[in-house]
Amino acid sequence: MGNPLAGRNPDGDAGLGAWIERVSGLRERPGYGFFGSRPGLLLGLALAGLATLGAASWSLSVGRPGHRSDRTVVAADPDDAVVPTWLVQTASRGFVYPGTLNLAWPSGGSAAIEVEGMGLLGHSGSMTSRHAIASITKTLTAYVILKDHPLSATAPGPTITLTKAMAAEYDDAIQDDESAVVTSVGERITERQALEALLLASAGNMADILALWDRGSVGAFLSEMNAQARALGMTRSTFTDPAGLADSTVSTMGDLLELAEAVQRVPALTAVVAETSATIPVAGTVYNVDRDLGSYGIDGIKTGTTAAAGSCLLFSAHVQVGGHTLTVLGVVLGMPGSSGIPYTALNAALRLVASAEAQIGQATVARTGEAVAALEQGDAKVAELGVADSLAVVGWPGLEYRVAVGGTASAATLSVTRTGGSPASASIPLLRLVSRASTAGKSTRTG
């Protein structure tokens, strides 16, 4: 049988073998088929060449796996189908806020401090060890009340008429040597006034009164308190009384920071804990035990003192840094002191907040015109890209950020994201920098 590639095909065209014979002047050797002949060898070489060309074209269109290892291709603009323009990040992919963090930790007890949404500045002592928390407990009591009976930041709320059982809580509190406000049967007090007595005067009897009003019994209210604690992520906390007098009511610094964050989401609660005084029916004017209010932006949250807990404080502060309002949250536990105003915890918190605020600031990641990326075609750099304006981040010494060039060659950006913190990021467009080779009066800078 003759070679199927020789001669003409069914449509009358010359076969591929005949064409090769004509252009090469070669003929088949006797006794060999086409694929063992010199024309077959030429055909194989031709097909191999076409395959190589096709592979090269594909690699240009989809990427360059052999690109230099010290630079990573971010994106490409396929505007030029033959030689695409590649956007390459040349800036470091990480940034560490300069300096050394130095916080004023208390000499005793334990403490922790964070910036909400940005992360933990640091802690002294275990974040997971369980500790009696005294009247800090009343913060969760108020949170549960406001969840069940929401108020605006200024509303008085519904009126509570004290029953005989409610009024009797005062005598019980005095007998237990617990802080309390005077009450009477039939007294009419608004929800807000009850919360002010609970959180400012730290009235233990008001914690029980609110529990009875909300759930009908202290036991039912405690079940709800513990359920809410779990919902907030306070997985190591146990609440056995709504006032915190019991040694068995315990929490951790990590859990209490979760509670402090929850407080910030309830405007009525943040408004009450920031008050220095309030007027309550029967009891008259009550004053906030938190003597740190107003110093270094401190505006809450709750003090606590018992023999088991020592001197304690859960605190919040709002500070301005570079046009941004930051919320600083912290906790101090187990300081010396077992009764009265917890001065040791209050003083420790003042020093800690002052030292933190002194180190929270802004640092520049890239200055105006600083080259952070390049445009490349093939292996040649055709332009450098720089930030359109200085890009600064808010933070503190040691805080880490991710730095990334994104977008395309024609619309590139530089973004900075806090590592391990909030997913929010700062971003700024990149502009083509003026070439040093440009003549006077001409610019290659484009938007």
Image (cartoon, rainbow, N blue to C red):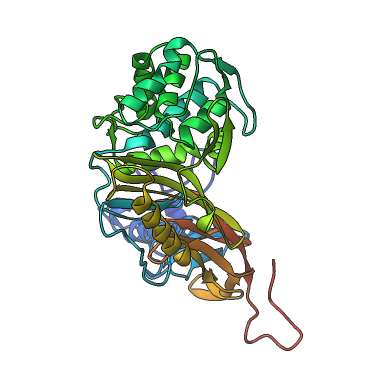
Q: Give percent across and percent down for residue 430.
A: 61, 66
Q: Give percent across and percent down for residue 297.
A: 53, 55
Q: Of residues 275 and 78, which is closer to you in this image? A: 275
Q: Of residues 368 and 433, which is closer to you in this image? A: 368
238, above or below 131, in the image: above
Q: Of residues 44 and 96, which is closer to you in this image? A: 96
> What residue is drawn where x is 31% and y is 25%?
175
Residue 23 can be seen in this image: no
Q: Give percent across and percent down for residue 256.
A: 36, 40
- Extreme-right residue of the structure: 441
10, above or below 248, in the image: below
> What residue is drawn where x is 63% and y is 26%?
156
Q: Give percent across and percent down for residue 429.
A: 62, 62
Quadrant holding the N terminus: top left
The answer to which quarter of the image holds residue 347 is: bottom left
Q: In this view, does 298 lie to the left or right of 105?
A: right
Q: Of residues 77 and 40, which is closer to you in this image? A: 77
Q: Is residue 45 left or right of residue 77?
A: left
Q: How many labels does the image show?
A: 0
Q: In this view, does 252 lie to the left or right of 203?
A: left
Quadrant holding the C terminus: bottom right
> What residue is drawn where x is 54% and y is 21%?
149
Residue 155 can be seen in this image: yes
